Amino acid sequence: MAAALQTTGLVKRYGALLVTDQVSLDIAPGELHAVIGPNGAGKTTLINQLSGELACDEGAIRFADEDVTAWPVHQRARRGLLRSYQITSIFEDFTVLENATLAALGAREHAWGFWRPMSANARAHSAAQEALAAAGLALRAQVQAGELAYGERRQLELAMALAAQPKFLLLDEPMAGMSVQESAAVIALLRGLKGRYTLLLVEHDMDAVFALADRISVLVYGRVMFSGTPDEIRNHPEVRAVYLGEDER
């Protein structure tokens, strides 16, 4: 089976600083693949390269069996490669449903109609409702987004990504800043998405990573030290020495 996403020798430099160093990953369709590593390992830089926000200095990215290395963010997004962010980005004066509908509209190149209400676009409205249900926000659809609690805002951001009907989701610390209860809700949410979407997860919460991941790659000084199942990661002596038990960005 062809990989959903494959990277070969990705490199990103800032002058003499090598941030990602020959990163090669192979992520299968339907897999939840986690990337972990100590502070400064290059995890967010890698996500930015995959999403198209940072150009690669070397290497190649293949998505859905196409070379997307030179594609801009919007072109990757419309092909189904989307990301979420560490910091929430929502329209606080719009309702939860309107936020999700806007995201669904933005994923379609010819969906905008400036003199029509958003709800008039049946496909976008339906995609938004389905995404809110998947993210556990169906009962909050008519609430103004600015009134949401922090954990619900993170759920809304995920719903907005789902409304764009992705094939592959890049998740950059979706549980950052959450309480134990909020994190548990997002873990349950992501578990429900497994198999329906291919997911790459960067997350500092090791309990979440080991509960969710099919495979884990450990990034150290910009290089992939080791990739394996959660059990293989737990029992790898070098990984334990370098990373497990330390704080992660």
Image: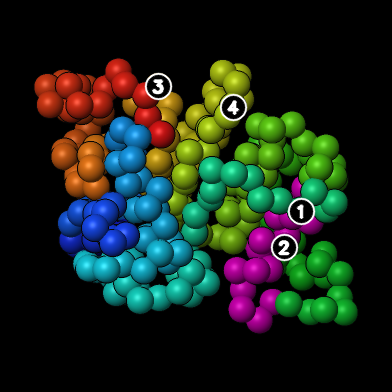
User: Which one is closest to the eye, mark 1 or mark 2?
Assistant: 1
Q: Circle 4: is it few (<14), some (14-19), or many (20+) Cα within 10 Å?
A: some
- Marks 1 and 3, how far apart at CA: 31 Å
- Callout 3 secondary element: helix
| Circle 3 residue | 207
Mark 1 vs mark 3: give the one in front: 1
Q: Position of residue 192 (x, y in %)?
A: 50, 37
Asked whether, in this view, residue 49 is left or right of residue 161, the answer is left
Residue at mark 2: 102
What is the secondary structure assignment of the residue under circle 2? helix
Q: Nearer the viewer, residue 136 or 39?
A: 39
Q: Which residue is mark 1?
A: 91
Asked whether 40 or 24 is in front, the reply is 40
Pointer 1 or 3: first along the chain: 1
**Which circle marks residue 169 in the picture?**
none
Characterize the local packing of mark 1: few (<14), some (14-19) or many (20 or more) Cα atoms within 10 angstroms: some
Q: Residue at x 62, y 57 (%)?
A: 163
Lower position in the chain sequence, tag 4 or tag 2: 2
Q: Type of residue at label 3?
A: Asp
Relative to residue 107, is residue 3 drawn left or right?
Answer: left
**Which residues fall within the magenta stretch?**
96-111
What is the spatial separation of the Cα atoms under label 2 and label 3, in whole angstroms? Answer: 33 Å
Q: Quadrant of the N terminus?
A: bottom left
Question: Residue 137 appears at what percent x and percent y?
Answer: 71, 39
